[in-house]
Each structure stands twice: as C-alpha cells, then as structure tokens.
C-alpha cells in the first residue's frame, strides 16, 4: 500500500487528496525578496497573446461553504495577460484558456478540509509518530489546516483543469500591480501548461510510494518555480539562462534565501516543513540543471523520463548517470505477527525523508551528509492495539562507508526509543523501532540474507 508522505498531506488535487500545493504568499515573498523584486515598483511585462480558444469555467462541489464565482470581464483579461506571461517565460503555448474561479477564503479552506482523507491522515500520523518525527499527541489535521490556511493566493486543480484565485487577491490585481500575487499566479498557470502539454493530470493521479511521489512533486513544483523566477528576472532585464548556466548559483541562492519564520510553517515539525519546501527549492535546482543542459526542452524531457527517487532530485548528476535504487522486498515479519502485530502499511521514504529522520538528536532539520549515500529503503509498520507501532526498515547505501555514516546517525536517532535496533552488514543498514526482542530474531536473520545478496554497487538504467 502506498503511504501518503508528509508532503502529500499538504498538497491539493482530485481524486487523490492533497497533491499540488496552493502556493502561498509567505513563500513567494521570500523568493521575491531574495531576488530583489519587492519594492522595485515594477512587474514583469505582458507577452504575446495566449494561443487557443476559450474554455468553460471550472465546476466545484456547490455544498462547500463560502463563495465561488466566475471572474468578471476585467478579471478575465488580467488572467489572460498572466497566461501570456506564463506562456512566454515557460516557452509553451496554451492549447486553450484556463477555466478560472474566484473564491473567498472560507471556500478555499472548505476545499482544503474536504480534500483531507481521514484514513490516509491516520496512516501518515501513525508512520511519522512511530519514527519520532511527529509528537504522539499531534492533531495532524489541525496542524495541516493551520499551515495551509496562511495566505493562500490560489492554486491549479489538475483534476478540474481550473485555476482558483482568492477573491481579495483578484480585487487587488484588478486595482493595481501586486507583484507577489502576479508571480504566484504565473507559477500556478505553469501547472496548467504542464497539464496541457506534459500529462500532469494523469501523472499526478498515479499511485506511488512516498519517495517517487516526492520526486515527481519536486519536478512539477521545481519547474513552475523556475518559470516563476524567470518571470521575476525578466522584470530586471535578466535572462534565466544567465542563472542556470552557472551550476551552483541556484543552490547558493536558496541557501541564502530567508527561511520560514514564526508563521505556522516555520513552527511546524521538520517532516512537514522540509518536505513542503523541498519540492520548490530542491526541485528548482534540479530543473535548473536540466535547463542548463538543454533549456526548457530539457525540463520537458524530465517530464518524460521522470526522476524516480529524491536522490535524483537532490543529486542531478545521479539522474543524468541513470543511477537506480536497489530493489528491496520485505518479507512478512511472522515473528511479530505471532505476537499479535498486524502489518498496516509499507513504503519507501527515500533520501529526502531519511535525511530528516537521521537528523534526530541534532540541532538540524536534516542530516544531508548521512543520507547522501542512500541507495534504497523499504519500511513496514506493524500495529497492535496495546503497543506502539513497530517499525521494520531495511536500507541500502552506495558504499560500505556510506552505510557506516548512516549507521552512526541511525543509532543517534533511535537512542531514546524502546525496542530500537540498528545493525549494519556490508552496505546495508537495518533499523528497528518499538520491536519486542522476541520478535526481532527472524527479522535480523532475513535482513542479513538480504545484505549478503546485495551486488557490490547500485544498479543503473
């Protein structure tokens, strides 16, 4: 069963819940501040007319609270101008106009609430509390709504093929030039271009494990963030290629950009904060590398040959080299089942989320060094009503030295956890949490056989 990651818990779409994040004014303000846009008084110029014919306005569940309406003629002209801008900076033509709805804050919040699936939320809560990444008493739904409720400007819904814009933002756009909101809406309109040209709707709805899903989201959001940056840079007379042509400049830019502050996102646990931000930051760096090599057609190509792991996103050279993760198949832990435990979920978390897990016991959100040698992982959660959920986690690493570094970090991360076991054999590391001693022997033996059978190096395409 595919388990929703922390990132998937804070994203929107249909029918799978919470996929494409509504871009927030808080985050775009950080980007525009770092780029020097705020206070410059200008806006990116409007480009050539958008191609295609007008579509019908999107539809939504009328039972939701709040107000939803079609845009006025003036508002539609503003959106059409932003479509021209998005088309120009992303170098893709719209095949048809994007249906647009104007909604008040109550309606957007109701949509977010309706998209939260209680069963998936419960699984995510169980997973991340079992790993020590969320407090046991967390009200995850309230936390998500608090994070998502801050300054949502708008979002693109790939299932309905529509753009939703908050009403007060739309009124401000109609009254004057509002740089940050325009930048955000260009970002969201790039998602519409992805939908029309790059199979966003179909790919977004595919069932995936957490790691490949985080990787795909980073491609989608990184692409739109890079185009958004191109829009901002165009207002300053700078071509995006001047930035992406220098391999490390985007990485240095995001390292220097202001971090989330005292808002709900800044206060959220690292598993939420990092996985929410990484698709935009790491994703933009990954897409910037594709742009450096082949322009926007290079980014388009990544939508056809997807990054399948967050390792690919975090290390674009490994994507280019075709490095693939080790195949890991977990056997059933019958010794745990004999103790009354039931396997409730199974997943692959990947390098990004392992970097957060391995940082426990430090003052940092991530241990990027310990996670950098990731080559594969598979995790299973076993539940029993009268005991904490048990975690069985097999991981593999590029080299034995990488495995040793991960082993040290994993021991630190599990130091305060009952039933914690960390074992290394070759380039494989076993992590157990809340596993009774009586149930661990069979698991250790099976892991040892897996470790001995691993090839000397990870596979490639």
Image (spheres, rainbow, N blue to C red):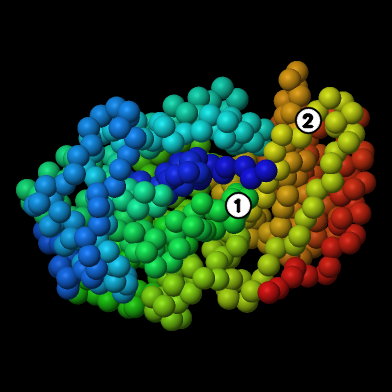
Of the two numbered discs 2 and 1 on the same chain, state the one appearing first in sequence: 1
Q: Which quarter of the rendered picture does the N terminus lie within?
A: top right
Residue bearing the label numbered 2: 342
Q: Nearer the viewer, residue 20 or 312?
A: 20
Rendered image quadrant of residue 48:
bottom left
Q: CA distance from mark 2 to mark 1?
A: 22 Å
Q: Residue at x 24, y 68 (%)?
A: 52
Q: Nearer the viewer, residue 249 or 17?
A: 17
Q: In this rendering, is residue 235 above or below 210?
A: below
Res. 76 visible in picture: yes
In the rendered structure, the answer to whether residue 66 lies left or right of residue 136 reads left
Q: Residue at x 25, y 29 (%)?
A: 66
Rendered image quadrant of residue 94:
bottom left
Q: Position of residue 230 (x, y in %)?
A: 29, 68
Q: Position of residue 350 (x, y in %)?
A: 64, 53
Characterize the local packing of mark 2: few (<14), some (14-19) or many (20 or more) Cα atoms within 10 angstroms: some
Q: Position of residue 38 (x, y in %)?
A: 19, 55
Q: In this rendering, is residue 79 above or below 123?
A: below
Callout 2 touching callout 1 (CB < 8 Å): no
Q: Position of residue 166 (x, y in %)?
A: 23, 41
Q: Residue at x 48, y 74 (%)?
A: 301
Query: In the current view of this chain or complex, which residue is farthest to the bottom?
Result: 294
Q: Nearer the viewer, residue 305 or 421?
A: 305
Residue bearing the label numbered 1: 208
Q: Which quarter of the rendered picture does the C terminus lie within?
A: bottom right
In the rendered structure, the answer to whether residue 62 lies left or right of residue 137 reads left
Q: Secondary structure at mark 1?
A: loop
Res. 230 visible in picture: no
């Amino acid at each position: 069963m595919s388990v929703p990651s922390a990132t998937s818990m804070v994203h929107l779409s249909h029918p799978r819940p919470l996929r494409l994040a509504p871009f927030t004014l808080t985050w775009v303000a950080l980007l525009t501040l770092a780029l020097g846009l705020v206070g410059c008084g200008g806006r990116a110029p409007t480009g050539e007319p958008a191609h295609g014919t007008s579509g019908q306005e999107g539809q939504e569940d009328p039972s939701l609270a709040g107000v939803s309406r079609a845009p006025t003629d003036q508002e539609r002209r503003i959106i059409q101008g932003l479509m021209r801008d998005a088309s120009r900076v992303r170098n893709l033509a719209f095949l048809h106009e994007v249906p647009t709805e104007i909604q008040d804050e109550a309606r957007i919040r109701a949509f977010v609430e309706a998209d939260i699936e209680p069963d998936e939320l419960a699984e995510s809560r169980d997973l991340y509390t079992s790993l020590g990444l969320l407090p046991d008493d967390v009200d995850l739904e309230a936390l998500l709504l608090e994070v998502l409720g801050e300054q949502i400007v708008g979002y693109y819904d790939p299932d309905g093929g529509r753009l939703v814009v908050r009403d007060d933002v739309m009124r401000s756009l109609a009254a004057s030039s509002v740089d940050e909101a325009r930048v955000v809406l260009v970002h969201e309109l790039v998602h519409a271009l992805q939908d029309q040209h790059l199979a966003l709707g179909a790919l977004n709805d595919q069932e995936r494990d957490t790691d490949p899903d985080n990787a795909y989201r980073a491609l989608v959001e990184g692409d739109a963030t890079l185009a958004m940056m191109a829009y901002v840079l165009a207002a300053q007379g700078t071509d995006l290629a001047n930035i992406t042509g220098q391999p490390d400049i985007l990485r240095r830019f995001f390292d220097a950009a202001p971090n989330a502050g005292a808002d709900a996102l800044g206060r959220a646990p690292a598993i939420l904060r990092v996985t929410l931000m990484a698709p935009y930051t790491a994703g933009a760096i990954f897409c910037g590398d594709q742009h450096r090599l082949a322009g926007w057609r290079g980014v388009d190509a990544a939508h056809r040959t997807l990054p399948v792991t967050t390792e690919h996103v975090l290390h674009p050279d490994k994507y280019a080299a075709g490095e693939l993760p080790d195949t890991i198949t977990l056997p059933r832990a019958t010794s745990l089942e004999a103790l009354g435990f039931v396997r409730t979920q199974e997943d692959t978390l990947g390098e990004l989320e392992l970097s957060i897990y391995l940082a426990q016991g430090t003052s940092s959100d991530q241990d990027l060094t310990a996670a950098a040698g990731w080559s594969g992982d598979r995790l299973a959660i076993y539940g029993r009503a009268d005991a904490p959920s048990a975690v069985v986690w097999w991981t593999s690493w590029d080299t034995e030295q990488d495995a040793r570094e991960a082993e040290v970090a994993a021991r630190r991360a599990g130091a305060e956890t009952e039933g914690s076991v960390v074992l290394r054999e070759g380039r494989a590391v076993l992590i157990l949490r809340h596993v009774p001693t009586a149930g661990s022997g069979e698991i250790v033996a099976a892991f040892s056989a897996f470790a001995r059978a691993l090839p000397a190096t990870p596979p490639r395409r």
